[in-house]
Amino acid sequence: MMAQPWDTREDTFGRNMQRLLSTYVFVSRKLTPELLEHIAGAGFQGIEIFCTRSHFEYSMKPEIRATADALEAHKLQLVSLHGPTSRDVSATRESGMPLSICEVERVRRIEAMDELKRVIDVADDLPYARLILHMGGARETADPRKRDAAFSTLEHLILHAHHAGVTICIENTTSEMGDPSYLRTFVDETRLTGLRFNFDIGHAYLSDFQEDERIDKSFAPLHDLVSSVHLHDNHGEKDEHLPPYDGTIDWPAAIKVLKSAPQGSVPLVLELKEKTGPEAPTAREQLAAAKRALDRFEEAWT
């Protein structure tokens, strides 16, 4: 297979911000070459693929290679994969069974680890820089046993990912174990070498701080180890994954926080919620709305 003509290990932006989109916005659909063509046609330069088997069959080499060919054809860079959060029972249906690195039961933890190793192994045929993982589910309570389980799992996964040229990034979420301060303490105490963070600005805006302090105080514990960012908006009450400026996040203030990252060149990935149902806009219309939000964000950034 021919190597991609771009460098998938570095994601930088300066005056011209790289336009990146998570395929989470189309997670209920198959990630087809046609859909990738639409994404490229909307002006996006790269993607993060959300890994669920009904969307992207990450364990099947023919599908991985077909996706690689489509990305190359449309000059789209794969900057990251988002790890699965549940187990699929088939290629077309999700079981809803959680897949967690915090699984206390050894057999289930090994199953989760093996599944995530399959995701890492995508890099053999389709290089990418980062794997985004959650520290358990959306309501994961802090528990020493879960912490030990996460350490054991991540110790194995980081080594496996290192050999594949992939960096593992843990994302802040609204759970106790996904709290930024908890995540920072976990990294400092376990001293897991090479582990980084994905800062999710929408999740940070749902924290318990005062509204005008939520993003700053959530970012602070993580800032020197942030390697990527998820961009989306909400109204401060639930995880809506709206386009920037459709919620109540103070984006000028948020941009100042993001620009304070020591690395300075972390990729900003737009991660929007899919709209489905008979009244839902088409894929092209959803991409157009995403583009408009990113146009406004990029203008404010520069």
Image (cartoon, grey):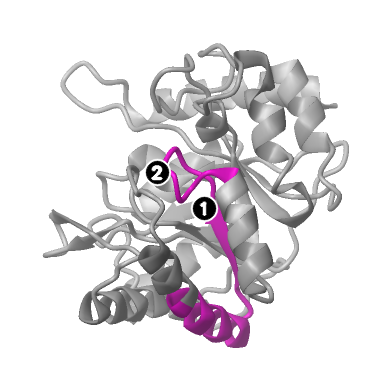
Q: Is residue 197 visible?
A: no
- Does 146 lie within the magenta span? no
2 or 1: tag closer to the N-terminus: 2
Residue extending farthest front:
144
Number of the label disc, if any, that sits on residue 65: none
Percent from the top left, x then y, of residue 82? 45, 57
Q: Is residue 142 above or below residue 298?
A: below
Residue at figure coordinates x 41%, y 61% from the top left: 83
Residue at figure coordinates x 86%, y 49% from the top left: 262
Left or right: where 133 falls relative to 227: left
Closer to us: 73 or 19: 19
Left or right: where 274 falls relative to 224: left
Percent from the top left, x then y, of residue 194? 68, 73
Name the quarter where the C terminus is drawn.
top right
Percent from the top left, x then y, of residue 7? 73, 68
Residue at figure coordinates x 51%, y 34% from the top left: 203
The reply to whether the C-beta atoms of the residues labelled 2 and 1 are less than 8 Å apart is: yes
Residue located beneath label 2 in the image: 24
Q: CA distance from mark 2 to mark 1?
A: 8 Å
Q: Magenta stretch?
A: 152-180
Q: Is residue 26 above or below residue 49?
A: above
Tell me which corner region of the image, top left, top right, bottom left or bottom right, holds residue 19: top right
Number of residues whose C-alpha sits closer than 10 Å to that of mark 2, classed few (under 14), some (14–19) or many (20 or more): many
Tell me which amino acid carries mark 1: Glu
Tell me which amino acid carries mark 2: Tyr
Q: Is residue 144 above or below residue 259?
A: below
Total label count? 2
Number of the label disc, if any, that sits on residue 48: 1
